[in-house]
Image (cartoon, helix red, strand yellow):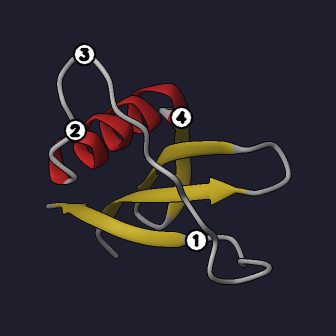
Amino acid sequence: MKNQLTLTYNQTNGKICLETYDEGFFNQSIDITSEVVELVIEKLFDDMECPPNGGVLELTRKKDKRDNIIKVIGEIK
């Protein structure tokens, strides 16, 4: 089994973590919540062409509830 990097979101504690697995066994979890949120907000403002010194974005959730999101984002060979 290969080593993996997994991006996870835990709705209970509100954290986005980068988790590493070594030969299928959990290795470590790094909280990247604040970094991800900052990047996403900047990207949204850029994508919506908001002025650099201001602007308002309104977000609307389309689903009432989401399950935990788990996505493998890379493998280490």
Which mark is first along the chain, 2 or 1? Answer: 2
Crowd rating for badge 2 (residues with CA inside 10 Å; few <14, some 14–19, many 20+): some
Crowd rating for badge 4 (residues with CA inside 10 Å; few <14, some 14–19, many 20+): some
Which residue carries the number 1 mark?
Answer: 69
Crowd rating for badge 3 (residues with CA inside 10 Å; few <14, some 14–19, many 20+): few
Which residue carries the number 3 mark?
Answer: 53
Q: Residue at x 45, y 57 (%)?
A: 7
Q: Residue at x 44, y 46 (%)?
A: 57
Which mark is first along the chain, 4 or 1? Answer: 4
Q: Secondary structure at mark 1?
A: loop
For marks 1 and 2, give the one nearer the viewer: 2
Q: Which mark is residue 33?
A: 4
Would you say 28 lies left or right of 6 here?
Answer: right
Task: Point out the residue furthest to the top here.
Answer: 53
Q: Secondary structure at mark 3?
A: loop
Which residue carries the number 2 mark?
Answer: 50
Splitting the image into 4 quarters, where does residue 59 fall? bottom right
* 34 vs 17: above or below: above
Splitting the image into 4 quarters, where does residue 65 fall? bottom right
Residue 26 position, x and y percent, is: 57, 53
Amino acid of disc 3: Asn
